[in-house]
Image (cartoon, rainbow, N blue to C red):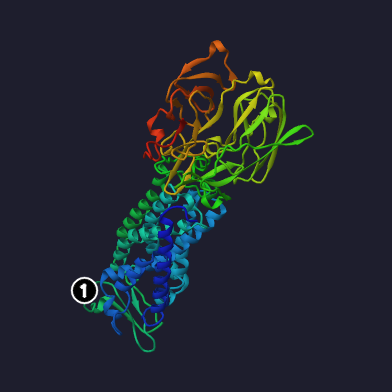
Amino acid sequence: MIALPYDYFLIAWFVLAAGCTAYVAFDQFNGNPEPTVMKWGFILVTLYMGPFGLLLYVLADKEPRPGEHEHFTSPLWKQGVGSTIHCVAGDATGIILAATVTALLGLPMWIDLIVEYVAGFSFGLFIFQSLFMKKTMGGTYWENVRKSFMPEFISMNAMMAGMAPTMSLLMMGRDMRAMDPLELVFWGVMSLGVMVGFATAYPFNVWMVKKKIKHGLMTERGGSEQRQEGHEGHGGGEPPKHDVGEMKHGSGHQMGSDATTPQLAALAGVTSLLLISGMVIPGFSVNLGLSARDVDGSIMPPGMINTFDLPGEAMKDMAAVKPRQVAYVAAPNARGDKVLEPRIENGVKVFDIKAEIIRWNILPDVAVEAYAYNRQVPGPRLQVTEGDHVRINFRNALPESSTIHWHGLILPNEMDGPAKVTQDPVPPGGSYTYEFDVGQSGTYFYHSHDHPDRQQALGLYGALLIAPKDSAAEVRADLDYTIQLQEWLKREWLTYPAMLMEGALPNYFTINGKAYPSTDTVAMKVGQTIKIRFIGTNNNFVHPMHVHGGPFEVVAVDGVNLKDSARYQADTVNVGPGQRYDVIWTARKPGKWLVHCHIPHHTANNNVEQHGGGGLMLVLNVQ
């Protein structure tokens, strides 16, 4: 999935890695004189490390001219490269295979690390060392297992000490697609982990080659030619006789170790400590108890605080909407809050509402991935009359469960909408029918009540306007305009549910799904009145909504008309989440009069003003 800018880098990286691997494979099997196991070692490491693997091959192992391989590879640092290549090729292969399997099985990260270690160590010891190197080392298979155990243990510990924290911190970091083998970033983390593991294992392998505990680079020529291995660097010259093991092709290569038992014990102890630290310490920062299934490829908002006790459900709630799940792309000039006309079935007003993921423009050049009812933000306006019997057929086309709550209405409990409280959540692809008598009048709204912190923030809300049975009870004006407030978080191409918490604060604000200057301009004439219905469909802030050009009269609060004696004059009302205010404003003077939130940051678009403002602003254009 292409979701973040570095996804393009990863594509380029792996194309480059494939090219480098193809070159190394061709060159190894068309003239580089060394054992087959080392040929495959360099091929695998180049596959994992891309151009860095190619660099190591060219600098340390590729025969510069015919007959010079022995001389070229003799320096100790190159022999250490060869030893580390052999270690990484075997161990990393086991680690990567184990990581893939454990992720697909849904095992938690801490188990994954243990399985990776066991698999890497086993693959390196029993296959790459004892089996593939049997001809070179001589002796029986189990003798080679015994001889290889300690050097492989030290080398594997050092390598995993680098790989484990790299994988843990990146896989459980901001972009948790890295836990999913079906995502490219998973393989990017594996590649980086192998490079870090190579760096941590290299110095230990240099020492073991120096002490003749491990083989380094070798030369193998056909026929009567000799196979040789150098252990120490001597300024690029020919290594001394006692540092070069010589044998006829296929005769085996016995090594006499110079290391003492205390040295080996100290090395094993230190690398074990590094290994344990590398596997345990990341658990202080990230939740190693989670699996790939628990986080479902979540991408967290930039700057979010991730802790070791953050649950997977919380991560999924805060995660970006996945662009590949967009089912519909709305026209850039599409408007929300369109009146949904009901059909009449046996006297019942029937509405059909569908929730799905769409791409929605809040500005001409800014689009969000939104959760939407009937492909619009806000959702369609439902207009009914007090006393109506209504039926709402809800269909859920989201990738997660959902419900609808009818905010402020008195209705049967089973129709109220809270998930797992009054009804089972409607699963993806499922449906639910809400049916009730409308017994109130005024300004109301509907919204999701299943993960509302996520779903309502991403656009699942709409106006529900109920006319009184007695039309004389309606507080009328020349014009009627509904304002539904919302907050959005759009960063680095992705849309996140805006939340009042670290790293998830909104940077865009909308009225009826659009940010100024894309909000409506309402045309009026001097002397006309307008009824503005403020609805707090947002999740987070209390918005002090202010009208220029004179005060207004507050005539209704939360759907209930105020008595004449209770109505009051104001020029600002604090509209909190879930609150509604109906106000009557009179156009006293010609001009462009603003309606806006009085928090200046909320009248900017990503902290920038456009044409005098942004976000929660619209114009009453009085002629």
Q: Position of residue 492 (x, y in %)?
A: 42, 48
Q: Which residue of the protein is positioned furthest toward the right in this rendering?
A: 346
- The image shows residue 13 at horizontal and vertical percentages of 40, 63
Q: Residue lying furthest bottom in this view?
A: 224
Write down the residue under mark 1.
234
Q: Please name whichever residue, 490 or 72, is drawn nearer the observer in this view of the structure.
A: 490
User: Which residue occupies 24% across, 77% down?
Assistant: 239
The answer to whether 480 appears left or right of 470 in the picture is left
User: In the rendered view, would you say 167 is above or below 202?
Assistant: above
Image position of 203 with respect to 307: above or below: below
Residue 41 position within the rendered picture, expressed as x and y whole percent measured from the top left? 41, 71
Residue 147 in sight in this render: no
- Residue 439, by quadrant, is top right
- Could you say which quadrant of the image residue 403 lies in? top right
Residue 97, given in percent of the width and then of the height, sits at: 50, 61
Q: Is mark 1 on a helix, strand or loop?
A: loop
Left or right of 342? Residue 307 is left
Q: Does residue 108 appear in the picture of this structure?
A: yes
Say which amino acid is labelled 1: His
